[in-house]
Amino acid sequence: MVETTSTNWIGLALVVGPGGIGSAVAAQLKKCCPHLKVLTAGRHGPPESSLQLDLENDSDLDRLGMSLRAESLPLRLVFNCSGRLHGPELQPEKRLQQVERYQLEQQFGINAMAPILLAKAIEPLLQRDQPFHFASLSARVGSIGDNRTGGWYGYRAAKAAQNQLLRCLSIEWARRWPMATVSLLHPGTTDTALSRPFQNFVAPDKLFSPERAAQQLVEVLLQQTPEQSGAFLAWDGQSIDW
Ligand SMILES: NC(=O)c1ccc[n+]([C@@H]2O[C@H](COP(=O)([O-])OP(=O)(O)OC[C@H]3O[C@@H](n4cnc5c(N)ncnc54)[C@H](OP(=O)(O)O)[C@@H]3O)[C@@H](O)[C@H]2O)c1
């Protein structure tokens, strides 16, 4: 088989964070890249189809490489779909007096540090002579240039930090792994547990189903080439201001 496009790639794909969008991305990759074996990795999920991975736990990240190596297939694509906006003790801040250290740490732990530590964990599996995609979900609200409404201090700042960390990665990998493409993707507002408490002001036609978001994201991702590595793109392929 000649690998003319990414849809013909042969090997292993890993989707990390199989939540609303991540599960749909894994399903979409299975559909459009039939020669890739698609694995998921996260804190939950049946062990037979999902690798155990808490991205905020270094031992789990250390073990990830071993689990992937055991598959005996070249790693061709890693798509980080994990993230956090709210939780039992975490609400996006509306004003300065709501900014708390422990909440900033929660936001940065998963939205900024996890993607770059994931890249570090999988780097030993890369091969110089094989194209490879590393994608991670960011968010338009992480754009500093596009920030006109303020609020959501921790989430916005953590996504902006992720953008910078993965931009650095794209520059280093362009030298060391020239066939790798790093992409930061904004899915658009999508109907998942993450966005559910904040959907009141979203017009129904602006709220994507996870399946639609996944289809759009995978389409944009697979069009990217190493020359475009380090881009911050929306679901429609448009570039987003840093
Ligand atoms: N939905 C939207 O409208 C929207 C808009 C812009 C950007 N995004 C971004 O898109 C990404 C996916 O969001 P989603 O809407 O699909 O949210 P979601 O359904 O809540 O999925 C988030 C996933 O991240 C996983 N995760 C969180 N912490 C983790 C950890 N420490 N280790 C491993 N996995 C962890 C969650 O797993 P657990 O079940 O273990 O917590 C879950 O599988 C996020 O980065 C989000 O910021 C979403």
Image: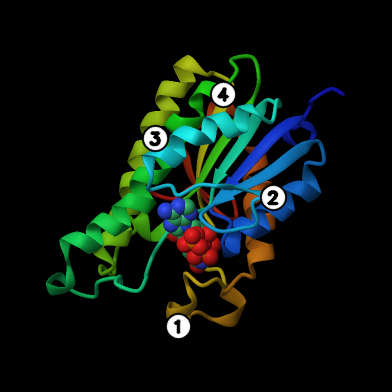
Q: Mark 3 points at which residue?
A: 167
Helix, strand or loop at label 1? It is loop
Marks 2 and 3: CB-CB under 8 Å? no
Q: Which of 10 and 56 is in front in this view?
A: 56
- Point out the tag, 3 or 4, that comes first from the N-terminus: 4
Residue 234, image x, y percentages = 52, 53
Using the numbered discs, state the Cα–Cα distance from disc 1 to disc 3 in whole angstroms.
Answer: 32 Å
Give the amino acid type for the residue marked by disc 1 in the picture.
Answer: Phe
The residue sitting at 41% across, 25% down in the picture is 171
Residue 201 numbered mark, or none: 1
- Point out the tag, 4 or 1, that comes first from the N-terminus: 4
Q: Establish if 47 lies above or below 178.
A: below
Q: Establish if 100 lies above or below 184.
A: below
- Point out the tag, 2 or 3, that comes first from the N-terminus: 2
Helix, strand or loop at label 4? It is helix
Using the numbered discs, state the Cα–Cα distance from disc 4 to disc 1 in whole angstroms.
Answer: 43 Å
Helix, strand or loop at label 2? It is loop
Comparing labels 2 and 1, the label whose residue is closer to the camera: 2
Q: Name the residue under label 4.
A: 125
Comparing labels 4 and 1, the label whose residue is closer to the camera: 4
Marks 4 and 2: CB-CB under 8 Å? no
Q: Name the residue under label 2.
A: 49
Q: Quadrant of residue 5?
A: top right
The residue sitting at 25% across, 72% down in the picture is 93
Viewer can see residue 139: no
Residue 109, image x, y percentages = 32, 51
The residue sitting at 18% across, 74% down in the picture is 95
Give the amino acid type for the residue marked by disc 3 in the picture.
Answer: Arg
